[in-house]
Image (cartoon, grey):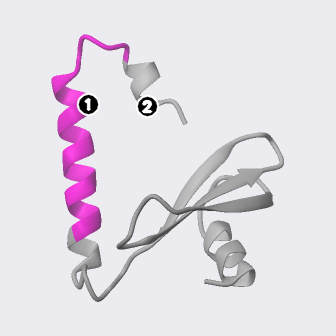
């Protein structure tokens, strides 16, 4: 993934922040993962999904959302603001 593709993917989200730089996170071997730094010192992780391994990306995303919702429901003893802080 080149820098223009990365910047374009980052713009697709409703964050109202500007891209400053990125660093490839090389700990995974299936997907390409990048740490994005913004102009407000906030960071985001973007992943380019390997469609050869994950051929049902909408199903993958739905599963991630379901797991996240379940964890939020079952971890009520933690303060919800801390769990949902972005």
The quadrant the C terminus occupies is top right
Would residue 16 be seen by someone viewing this image from the given angle?
A: no
Q: Position of residue 36 (x, y in %)?
A: 67, 57
- Residue 8, horizontal then vertical, whole percent: 68, 77
Q: Residue at position x 61%, y 74% from top?
A: 9
Task: Classify mark 1: helix, strand or loop.
Answer: helix
- The local secondary structure at tag 2 comes to helix
Q: Is residue 30 visible?
A: yes
Q: Is residue 24 a member of the stretch shown in magenta? A: no
- On screen, 49 above or below 23? below
Q: Is residue 46 left or right of residue 82?
A: right
Q: Quadrant of the N terminus?
A: bottom right
For marks 2 and 1 on the same chain, the one whose residue lies earlier in the sequence: 1
Q: Nearer the viewer, residue 69 or 19?
A: 19
Q: In this picture, which residue range is highlighted in magenta?
A: 60-79
Q: Main secondary structure of the magenta part?
A: helix
Q: Residue at x 38, y 70 (%)?
A: 29
The spot of residue 50 in percent (x, y) is 36, 81
Residue 53 higher or lower than 11, as above or below: below
Q: What's the mark number on residue 84?
A: 2
Question: Which residue is denoted by mark 1 in the rendering?
Answer: 72
Q: Is residue 69 above or below residue 37?
A: above
Task: Judge whether residue 75 is colored magenta.
Answer: yes
Asked if labels 1 and 2 touch by Cβ distance under 8 angstroms, the answer is yes
Real-space Cα separation, disc 2 to disc 1, in angstroms: 9 Å
> Seen in the image, is 13 located left or right of residue 22?
left
């Amino acid at each position: 993934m080149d820098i223009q593709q990365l910047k374009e993917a980052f713009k697709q989200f409703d964050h109202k922040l500007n891209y400053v730089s990125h660093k490839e996170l090389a700990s995974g071997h299936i997907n390409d993962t990048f740490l994005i730094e913004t102009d407000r010192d906030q960071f985001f992780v973007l992943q380019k999904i390997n469609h050869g391994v994950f051929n049902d990306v909408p199903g993958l995303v739905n599963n991630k959302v379901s797991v996240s919702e379940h964890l939020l429901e079952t971890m009520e003893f933690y303060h919800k603001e801390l769990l949902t802080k972005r």
